[in-house]
Amino acid sequence: MSEPSRDVTGSSLVAVFAHPDDESLACGGLLAMCAERGVRVSVLCLTHGEHGPGRGRDGLGELRAQELREATRVLGIRDVVLLDHEDGMLPWIDAARLEADILDVIRRFRPDVVLTFDEDGLYWHPDHIAVHERTTAAIAGLGPSAPALRYVSMPEGAMRALVEAASSHAQLATSAGGTTGSDRAPGRILGVDPDAFGSQAPEPTLVVEAGQFAARKLAALRCHRTQVEGSALEWLDERDAARLLGTEHYRRAAVGAPGDSFLEGLGTSYAH
């Protein structure tokens, strides 16, 4: 177990994800923490998410691109690289092409740490799993010059607890005749069944308590309006955010720079 330290000024991190909103839900607390403490934080998003929930809207991809820019500003992120691969098709795009795109960003920003999905893609989303595989392969190919690689995961039951809290708020509002939030039942998280999150997730090696940044994480999530509408995230307050969104889980990859990274100094790490 390692003791947290605070001096990470001058470090750098690149987070690699598939869609706008992944960055906020998966690791928004850690990204905000790093940005505030002097880390240069960059996000690579491989698609515009144009086929996601809300796809009946004209120009959904461009709307989601704008939402990503707003969310990353809330989190304090300096650099965003948004590519135009087709949403939902990442497993079928040429692997070498995706790896080259990821390597381009790594070489541009020269991060100490790269973050991406764990092997379960948070909830077994094929695009997320493809990003995990291609990022892992890209890092492995760098050999001794590779940055550290960490995977973000989510424990089973975490999103179910969030939905239950939101449902309680919704029931109280309905009983009181309130109109806050969506009229729809808050049973999903960004269009996803909450019980899909964390199912068979690998054990984390690092737990980061980012409760002081949870309100910022929730605000960033709500920037993704096309995805949040009608979901449990509409009903949460800042106290819920600290309790339900403030703890984040990460796992050390078998490839990339060995040993502890600056991230291990931000949380409590466990050897597995």
Image (spheres, rainbow, N blue to C red):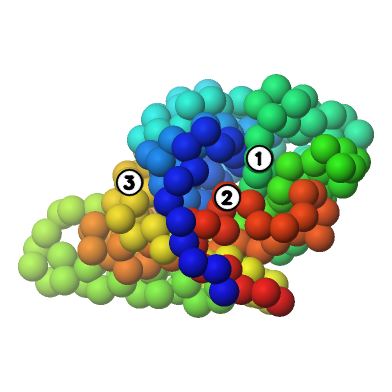
Residue that badge 2 annotates? 262
Q: How many marks?
A: 3
Q: Which mark is residue 216?
A: 3
Q: Which of the marked residues, 1 or 3, is nearer the chain's N terminus?
A: 1
Q: Nearer the viewer, residue 68 or 12?
A: 12
SS type, badge 1: loop
User: Of the residues shown, which amino acid type is indicated by label 2?
Assistant: Phe
Residue drawn at (16%, 71%), measured in percent from left and top? Answer: 172
How far, Cα to Cα, is label 2 from label 1? 8 Å
Q: In this rendered view, identify the residue nearer to me: 258 or 95.
A: 258
C-beta proximity under 8 Å, tags 2 and 1? yes
Are dots 3 and 2 in contact, CB under 8 Å? Answer: no
Instruction: Give the x, y percent position of residue 59.
Output: 53, 24
**Location of residue 81 with respect to 256 vertically, above or below:** above
In the picture, the disc for residue 131 is none
Looking at the rendered image, the quarter that the C terminus falls into is bottom right
- Relative side of 65 to 143, left or right: left
Secondary element at tag 2: helix
- Residue on which disc 1 sits: 112
